[in-house]
Image: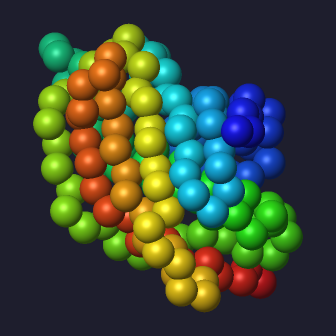
């Protein structure tokens, strides 16, 4: 199983601060699955507005974290990088469910499995958890497109 630090992640994701939401890849099995981490710091730019009195990570950003992990898995699966002329766009989210809030100080574990691939369309099952408790789950659809 392959691991990736932030320097390797930056080679596979076009995202940058404040929108880079994957800090480390613990395991990556190209074409199969990825397990990654997002350390949720009180210094996140969304916390002052969501919510100042009770800092909670927005659910859409939990899903985005899962989608970014899925993008890394996609790039590793085809052995390409975003600067190779293609990018993965989020095309759909199905069956999203949020089970518990993610708070400042939590370490979000991202588990994403590739469930289907048809040409340039990928479907994934994503689950996010904190301390062994499920926080969110969804199905993610990404599409690979050439960039001009």
Which residue occupies 37% across, 58% down?
125
Q: Nearer the viewer, residue 70 or 33?
A: 33
Residue 14 position by quadrant = bottom right
The x and y percentages for residue 58 are 27, 38
> x and y percent of residue 112 in the render?
46, 50
Which residue is pictured at 55% across the width and 51% down the height? 33
Q: Is residue 124 visible?
A: yes
Above or below, 71 relative to 63: below
Q: Quadrant of the C terminus?
A: bottom right
Query: Can you give x and y, in whole percent of width and height, for residue 138 in the image?
Result: 28, 56
Q: Left of 55 or right of it: where is 19?
A: right
Is 54 placed left or right of 71 in the picture?
Answer: left
- Furthest residue toward right: 84
Looking at the image, residue 89 lies above or below residue 20: below
In the rendered image, which quarter contains the N terminus? Answer: top right
Residue under the point 34% across and 38% down: 128
Q: How many marks?
A: 0
Residue at the extreme bottom? 119
């Amino acid at each position: 199983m392959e691991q990736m630090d932030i320097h390797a992640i930056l080679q596979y994701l076009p995202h940058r601060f404040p929108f880079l939401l994957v800090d480390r890849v613990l395991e990556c099995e190209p074409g199969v699955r990825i397990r990654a981490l997002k350390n949720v710091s009180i210094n996140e730019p969304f916390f002052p507005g969501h919510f100042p009195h009770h800092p909670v990570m927005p659910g859409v950003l939990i899903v985005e974290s899962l989608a970014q992990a899925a993008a890394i898995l996609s790039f590793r699966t085809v052995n390409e990088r975003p600067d190779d002329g293609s990018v993965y766009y989020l095309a759909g989210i199905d069956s999203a469910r949020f089970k518990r809030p993610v708070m400042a100080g939590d370490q979000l574990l991202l588990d994403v499995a590739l469930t289907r691939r048809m040409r340039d369309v990928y479907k994934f099952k994503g689950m996010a958890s904190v301390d062994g408790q499920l926080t969110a789950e969804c199905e993610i659809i990404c599409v690979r497109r050439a960039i001009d």
